[in-house]
Amino acid sequence: TRKFSSTDTNKSFLDGLTNARAAEILARDGPNALTPPPTTPEWVKFCRQLFGGFSILLWIGAVLCFLAYSIQVGTEDEPVNDNLYLGVVLAAVVLITGCFSYFQEAKSSRIMDSFKKMVPQQALVIREGEKLQIDAELVVLGDLVEIKGGDRIPADLRVVSSSSCKVDNSSLTGESEPQTRSPQFSHENPLETRNICFFSTNCVEGTARGVVIGTGDRTVMGRIATLASELEVGQTPINIEIEHFIRIITGVAVFLGMSFFVLSLILGYTWLEAVIFLIGIIVANVPEGLLATVTVCLTLTAKRMAKKNCLVKNLEAVETLGSTSTICSDKTGTLTQNRMTVAHMWFDNTIHEADTTEDQSGLGFDKSSPTWAALSRVAGLCNRAVFKVDQDQVPILMRDTAGDASESALLKCIEVCCGSVRDLRDRNPKVSEIPFNSTNKYQLSIHEAEDNPAGHILVMKGAPERILDRCSTIMVNGQEMPLDDMWRDSFQSAYMDLGGLGERVLGFCHLILPSSEFPRGFTFDTDAVNFPTERLCFLGLISMIDPPRAAVNVSQRIQHVIMVTGDHPITAKAIAKGVGIISEGNETVEDIAERLNISLSEVNPRDAKACVVHGSDLKDMSAEYLDDLLRNHTEIVFARTSPQQKLIIVEGFQRQGAIVAVTGDGVNDSPALKKADIGVAMGITGSDVSKQAADMILLDDNFASIVTGVEEGRLIFDNLKKSIAYTLTSNIPEISPFLLFIIASVPLPLGTVTILCIDLGTDMVPAISLAYETAESDIMKRQPRNSKTDKLVNERLISMAYGQIGMIQAMAGFFTYFVILAENGFLPWSLVGIRIMWDDPNVNDLEDTYGQEWTYEQRKIIEFTCHTSFFSSIVIVQWADLIICKTRRNSLFQQGMKNRILIFGLFVETALAAFLSYCPGMDVALRMYPLKFFWWFCALPYSLLIFVYDEVRKYILRRCPGGNLSSAFHQGCGNPGC
Amino acid sequence: MSRTKENDGGWKKFVWNSEKKEFLGRTGSSWLKITTFYIIFYGCLAGIFIGTIQAMLLTLSNYKPTHQDRVAPPGLSHTPRSLKSEISFNVNDEKSYKDYISSIEELLEPYNEDLQTDGQNYEDCGADPQKYRERGELENGQGKRKACRFSRKWLNACSGVGDNTYGFAKGKPCLIVKLNRIINFRPRVPTNNETIPEPITSKVKPYLIPIYCKHKRDEDEGKIGEIKYYGFDGEPAPQYLQPLVAVHFTNLTQGEALRIECKVFGDNIDYSEKDRYQGRFDVKFTISKS
């Protein structure tokens, strides 16, 4: 400020900037707003959808198709258009799914944007001596700003004058306590000093004036936000899985392609033919429908999660939560209810437990004691908090209050236990009061007591030890007793107990002011204190805590939940115990030391599973020490952590190979949210910056919703595996006809069009329906997926899908193919080598086994009928495949057929196949021909075989998991999921 | 760069991990087990497959395929085969029609009279078309059934007896035409004379399936010249020698592409839009002389 006011007089300083000067600075510094993180242009996002992950595989396929087609155009007189069509279809599939997922994400980001469009912030500035209400964006450096309770602070301010101003810095530092602000310079560190208010924090009460010392990105908040946007984000686990999958598929495709390339050269095909075959085989390996299936499955899950209040910004993040092994949770709001509530009371030498549950389902306590009556009166009277108006319908605990958090807690508690506090206050009107201040650490007020018609009552609350010091008696069961050492000891132990629970404890006392000395109308002077404030009667203690949410009990969960908070270690530990982050029976080093009564250094740190780390210790730790700490403790609480430290913690876990989820709402969390594998922001309390940085938003701010997310994430991983297994299986019956065509020179059993009909037609709905499959066992009891060993697609799944089920399916298809040709006159052995004649349009008298002569067109019709029937056979064996893919270990008879979508899928698939075969005009459009009724049943025995084989396989797996009974069996067809 | 190196190391290790003695991620015994498993698995699968194929074969008749709806009505095929239904040759260049001649030769080979002498298999049905001879049901296997003799000589100028170039050397090519054979299919003579083109109505004899060729495009009218038909097409022996018709184009305009369509007429002979060889065919002649 000196910079600006040096030439001005003090008077002109109080007038604020001139409008001209303000405009000048605004032009120089730009508006007072955080630069939004560089938003990716829409077309880049779109391209990312088009060329990311899976799409690449399809693009390569399409390019290869076009390449093969151009070779054919260049070398053949009448090229077959199949490759061209296939290329076009592949490209179309990528484009359509790309558009689909692009719009899907655009929809979520629109919901995100709706958060941002809040009422534009206003700020009260003083310019040219006048108070102006302007947009917060127009506030400039050097402006004089006035703030009051309820305002959001428009910029970083240095306070020049204040009156009982308190700010809530929780979004910046994580501290939930409101903090006093005054012109007093109290600390070197700008974050600690009293005289600076930070941009985007809230003023809770009081008023203050300050000079703007930083705007926009130059504010403390701005710097954190910038830190977040500069972080590199790693790949999502599902992306890694898909890449791994692509690698496997490509490996298989290239291997098959190359071996048949060599084989076809040996068989005497020309180079060009061999190249066309090579490309054909590689392309045939591309599962055309899988991209769409995966996208739809993820979208369905995202929708399901959105219904349960988890909004997912990025489709791929849907699964991430499921594979999360470590959750770094913020305390405030997520694990706790984010409102102070009375937890315990100590009176009559007993600790009474108040009901802290959200729905008041907990136990009450004995309210008949006269001590309680006195205590509750003091708590109600010596209390400045009031309910905001028009909330009669709202349950008491949910009502909004004006006032300090702990006073509000007391207000609600008394309102619940003893009826209307307002009536109480009306009956006992306040005559005088001394508000709380940090020097005397108490608050007192004097009321005209209703039970003392002529006199007054003095009520006081404050820091327990200070209150006790002022007391000479203690009320026990309504009787005043002298406060002797015994009572002092029991007070001490109660105070220690409650403090040890991480609760904020307040002491209460009162004094009946006799009417003789202080009659009604007596003027109480709070400055001169013309009334006694010593030798009072101690009533009891009330302790408050921000209680854990009811639904949060992480103890049964396998995930590693770590608490990272800005709160005090003791409070943090208490909450951690309350929600099960530190489970019962687990001790920290300190606990062990205390229990065994030995010094800290004597305790073997390996004995302690739990640990509480102070943020300032974290600063001095080496990376190795931190790694060691994270490895050896399962239950960790980080207290008093700064944004950078959160980042260090997240990175520490990621170094261990963990997949880390971070929850947070404050701006200070945003770097960690961004760095985490999945950042979870809070929808209600969360700041814009944190929502920007997060991948997922909990619309109800409830940690329990994360559990839903984890559950859905794990389920979708399982189900995606099933979908992929299902889709991949039909690849073998699709490729093998082409291979047989090359090797044995038989008429082509299955054409490109029919392959596409399977991949993009009949297989789609059933594959998607697997996303609706319910979990086989309690999904939450499982360990989180080990991202190194538990892959989406592994060799076993491929071996199962390709090597076993796929082969049976191929046999079914070939059987139908041979049946049709044989019934029409071409017996199987006469087909070998027939290809050249068969495909020659000039041969119009090709003899079959019976000596009948076929024209080219007649042969082609029978060939396409074979394609159709091969196709229908695949549909029929895919029935069985769908049913066996439903479960990974359980028998169908255990799991049942409850998935209605799946049954629907079976019908759709069959109806579609029948439609494609029988609809008039299909012979022209897709060259698919009507099948004779009996031909549909050729594949049925194989379908049955698949089902029986897999049931037996699963039975063996269940009976001897990993057993030695038939090791070869396990090697070959062990659970594809394990 | 360092990343690719790492990957290389990973690959090498994957192919052969000397620490664990793993080849492609599996130990020797593991590979053995998995191979055993797959051998057994595929063995069983192959067995099941062959079993089902055998079962299917049992349902088939030895003489007649189960379904004939795709092969009938029969196609009309001609020899020599044309490449994209085009027959072009140079009268003075023997090589240009050598393939055509040899394919006709090959077709007519079995029709040599010395191959039809065996009385066990053949009987004389006369040179004129007659009624079908009933030779009993296919399925009752009482010895061999006899087939009618079909003499090559009946093809006159196209029999190759006098002119072993089948007219190609003179620019008057022969086409040997036959109705595709279908088991138990008996072409019926047209009952409706109106469908038969005028020029051949006079030639229609009982028990004869008439065939008629004409120019396809109107502008070619008059360039085709006389077409002679030898042999006969009708009342054939069902199995052994298909009756043939030789179409002799005796006066084709040379040096020009001429499209000719031949059609066979019968009650149960049909034509299809898509199948250009069903009951008809068309062929393009380009005869050059230089």
Image (spheres, coloured by chain):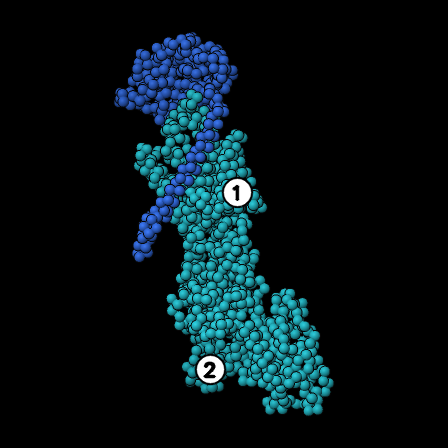
Chain colours: A cyan, B blue
What kind of element bears circle 2?
Answer: loop
Q: Residue at x 58, y 62 (%)?
A: A551
Q: Position of residue A409 (x, y in %)?
A: 61, 73
> How many other residues sit within 10 Å of disc 2, few (<14), some (14-19) or many (≥20)?
few
- Image height of B146 relative to A941, above or below: above
Q: Position of residue A970 (x, y in %)?
A: 44, 44
Q: Position of residue B128 (x, y in %)?
A: 43, 9
Q: Residue at x 48, y 83 (%)?
A: A184
Q: Residue at x 49, y 17 (%)?
A: B139
What kind of residue is marked 2?
A: Ser
Q: Earlier in the sequence, mark 1 or mark 2?
A: 2
From the image, tell me which residue sits under label 2.
Answer: A186
Q: Nearer the viewer, residue A809 or A957?
A: A957
Q: Chain of mark 1?
A: A
Q: Chain of mark 2?
A: A
- Image height of A729 relative to A370, above or below: above
Tell me whether marks 1 and 2 sit on the same chain. Answer: yes
Q: Residue at x 64, y 65 (%)?
A: A361
Residue A883, numbered label: 1
The quadrant the C terminus of chain B occupies is top left
Asked if residue B21 can be seen in this view, the reply is yes
What kind of element bears circle 1?
Answer: helix
